[in-house]
Amino acid sequence: MARILLVEDNELNRDMLSRRLARRGYKVLLAVNGIEGVESTRSEQPDLILLDMRLPVLDGWQVAQQLKQDPGTRHIPIIALTAHAIAGDREKALQAGCDEYEAKPVDFPRLLSKMQALLDRGQQE
């Protein structure tokens, strides 16, 4: 059972995604701001991170950069989630260290496919 860290400050989004992921058999860990996301990643070592890019305290761009610069967490795949799908956001997220990008509202089947591809890739390494 893969452990997914969902870093999301919006309660409705957090609740909806965490319930849907749990129904699919994932163990879901939650963080509500960027600092919690970094701390939870370091302590829990999830298999994958779903990272909202608009977060309080530390934004998603800063979180991704910190985690990818840390030898203890750089191997953990990150999927950026953003409601503000502006031209260039995908490239910016990838440059910050995210491995994938998904615009909100989330297309759940597509998100699951991206998650599985990253989890499969991690098992092969």
Image (spheres, rainbow, N blue to C red):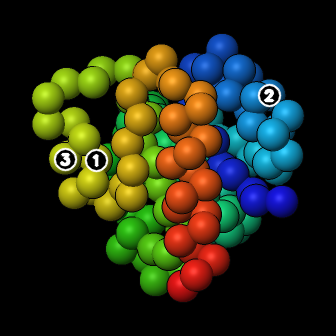
Which image quadrant is residue 57 in?
top left
Image quadrant for the C terminus? Answer: bottom right
Expressed as whole percent of the image width and height from the top left, the position of residue 99 reads 39, 58
Instruction: Look at mark 3 in the image and give the residue it sits on.
Output: 91
Q: Amino acid at mark 2?
A: Arg
Residue 93 circle label: 1
Q: Tag 2's secondary structure?
A: helix
Q: Determine whether, in the image, residue 57 is placed left or right of residue 115.
A: left
Q: Tag 3's secondary structure?
A: helix
Find the distance from the CA under tag 1 to the CA under tag 3. Answer: 5 Å
Of residues 34 and 29, the one drawn nearer to the viewer in this rendering:
29
Which image quadrant is residue 2 in?
bottom right
104 to 73, vertically: above or below? above
Q: Do we see residue 56 in this rendering?
A: yes
Q: Amino acid at mark 1?
A: Ala
Q: Amino acid at mark 3?
A: Glu
Residue at 19% x, 47% y: name it.
Answer: 91
Residue 19 circle label: 2
Find out whether the residues at labels 1 and 3 contact each other: C-beta distance under 8 Å: yes
Count residues near mark 1 (Cα–Cα under 10 Å), then give few for <14, some for 14-19, many for 20+.
many
